[in-house]
Amino acid sequence: MLLRKLTKHIQEQNWFAVFIDFLIVVVGIFVGLQVTNWSQNRSYEATTQQYYHRLVADLNADIYVFQTTLDYYTTVEQYASNTIDYIHKRESNNSSLNNNSSQKSDSQFVINAYQATQITTNGFLEYTYSELVSSGFIRNIKNSEIKSMLSGYYINSKFEDFMYVETTPYRIQIRRLLSASTQKKIREHCGDQEIFNDDRTSYEISLPETCIIEFDPETVSKELSALLSYKELEHDLNYLMSIIAIAKYNLQLNLDLAKAIKINIETLIEN
């Protein structure tokens, strides 16, 4: 309709009418582009907010994992420390296998030595970030600080996984020396326990901070003899504790970073 009117006005050389028709066309195109841009911006903002909320959910899960894993290795570290303390006390008392050491102390040593071999693994929720990268939407997030923090966080987290599952010489030797029945008894009474988050949508593993088990004197004597035959016991324990210290350090770094990113993203959501 507009094209016919424009053609007619040109034929009639009604230039004012031609100008009006042309102006209507230009304004129509401009308004159409503005509406399209507005719609795209709204869609972009809605999608960005959805990703922000999903990232916060992933980070909350990661924070929970980091904290429970940190607690787990703090407990393992204490068992290892108690094991070393026992060794030093025996050395200072010039003890032998057949001395007057109390059965309770020896029994606890066996328990501590085994509990110091415990390990746990942790996982990171990368679904949202992986989707952001694979879809290319990460380029649309205009906050460069957030993008940089997310990139560093998810890249570094992958390199920390091995820290928590490394099989040390100490773990191998202790589990070779102790009888299967003793190991089973310790696991049944003081093994890994499931702890759920507040809404019970996920759980992690914890280790009891104390473990008291009654063993008969013959079992204690046999297990004690086996453990004390391990010549590199203290050296391998020292190595284990250094690995735990590094793991805890990296866990704390990731925990602090996850909390910082979460706070920044929540600020963007509120704004």
Image: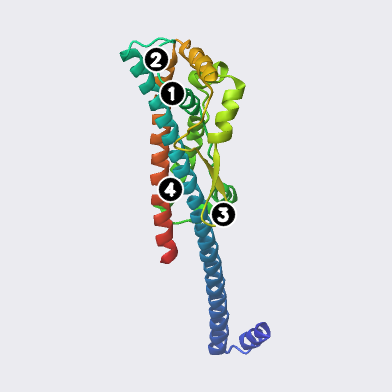
Three-letter amino acid code at the position of disc 1: Leu
Dot 1: within a 10 Å radius of its alpha carbon, few (fewer than 14), some, or many (20 or more) residues? many
| Residue 240's disc number | 1
Q: Quadrant of the C terminus?
A: bottom left
Three-letter amino acid code at the position of disc 2: Asn
Pair 1/2: label in front: 2
Q: Is residue 249 above or below residue 104?
A: below
> Which residue, given by chain and number where applicable, does mark 3 sit on?
200
Question: Mark 1 to mark 2: distance in Å?
Answer: 30 Å
Residue at x-position 38% and y-position 50%: 260
> Which residue, given by chain and number where applicable, does mark 2 sit on?
100
Dot 4: within a 10 Å radius of its alpha carbon, few (fewer than 14), some, or many (20 or more) residues? many
Q: Earlier in the sequence, mark 1 or mark 2?
A: 2
Q: Earlier in the sequence, mark 1 or mark 4?
A: 1
Q: Position of residue 253 (x, y in %)?
A: 39, 40
Question: Mark 1 to mark 4: distance in Å?
Answer: 27 Å
Question: Mark 3 to mark 2: distance in Å?
Answer: 49 Å
* Secondary structure at numbered mark 1: helix
> Which residue, given by chain and number where applicable, does mark 4 sit on?
258
Q: Earlier in the sequence, mark 3 or mark 1?
A: 3
Question: Mark 2 to mark 4: distance in Å?
Answer: 52 Å
State the residue in front, 18 or 95: 95
